[in-house]
């Protein structure tokens, strides 16, 4: 017996199917970009390789912002360096893990014409955003306190 049966997800229309495929392509591009970057040994600042300035929050207040280290975290993640990814930013590791799951899921859902395994997308979105926010803020508070 298969672990997944058609009809166990919310049906979607053609526009949503195309958006899911576009989302998958976007995620693939993000992972490809993260792989092309060299993780900064400091644990943050990898984004500067893209021509972006240093973190304004850290420059102004002398403490890292909640998202400091996320680009570095992704860059470590795509190399399988998950401990270094977590050291850079736990929220970045969590987001990378969720994105890694979403990548094949978005293509699969677009192909099947339903949100595979998801009956209530609003709840999934709320839990995902809430979880990511909580992990990122808690990680940041710990970083600032240390």
Image (tube, grey):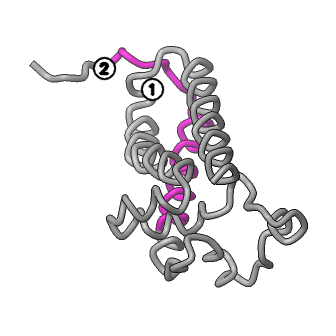
Figure check: 83 above or below 119: below
Quadrant where the image shows the N terminus: top left
Q: Which residue is mark 1?
A: 114
Q: What residue do we see at 62% from left, 34% from top? A: 134
Q: Residue furthest right?
A: 60
Q: What residue do we see at 73% from left, 61% from top? A: 64
Label 2 close to label 1 by CB (< 8 Å):
yes
Figure check: 121 above or below 134: above
Quadrant where the image shows the C terminus: bottom right
Q: Nearer the viewer, residue 125 or 14?
A: 125
Where in the figure is residue 102, as x and y percent of width and height? 45, 43
Q: Nearer the viewer, residue 119 or 55?
A: 55
Q: What residue do we see at 49% from left, 46% from top? A: 94
Q: Is residue 143 magenta?
A: no
Asked whether, in this view, residue 29 is left or right of residue 59, the answer is left
The local secondary structure at tag 2 comes to loop
Figure check: 10 above or below 78: above
Q: What residue do we see at 19% from left, 23% from top? A: 3
Disc 2 to disc 1, C-alpha distance: 8 Å
Q: Nearer the viewer, residue 138 or 91?
A: 138
Where in the figure is residue 74, as x and y percent of width and height? 50, 63
What range of the chain is rendered magenta?
6-31
Q: Which of the 4 quarters of the picture holds residue 81?
A: bottom left
Q: Is residue 26 magenta?
A: yes
Asked whether, in this view, residue 134 is left or right of residue 108, the answer is right
Q: How crowded is the residue under tag 2: few (<14 C-alpha within 10 Å), some, or many (20+)? A: few
Q: Which mark is residue 98?
A: none
Type of secondary structure dominating the magenta stretch: helix
Asked whether, in this view, residue 131 is left or right of residue 102, the answer is right
Q: Which residue is mark 2?
A: 6
């Amino acid at each position: 017996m298969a672990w997944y049966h058609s009809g166990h997800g919310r049906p979607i229309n053609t526009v949503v199917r195309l958006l899911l495929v576009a989302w998958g392509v976007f995620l693939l591009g993000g992972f490809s970009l993260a792989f092309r970057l060299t993780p900064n040994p400091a644990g943050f600042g990898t984004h500067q390789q893209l021509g972006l300035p240093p973190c304004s929050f850290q420059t102004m207040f002398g403490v890292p912002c909640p998202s400091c280290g996320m680009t570095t975290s992704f860059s470590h993640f795509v190399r399988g360096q998950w401990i270094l990814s977590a050291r850079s930013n736990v929220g970045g590791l969590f987001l990378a893990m969720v994105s890694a799951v979403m990548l094949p899921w978005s293509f699969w859902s677009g192909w099947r014409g339903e949100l595979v395994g998801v009956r209530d997308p609003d709840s999934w979105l709320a839990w995902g955003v809430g979880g990511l926010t909580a992990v990122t803020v808690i990680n940041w508070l710990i970083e600032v306190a240390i």
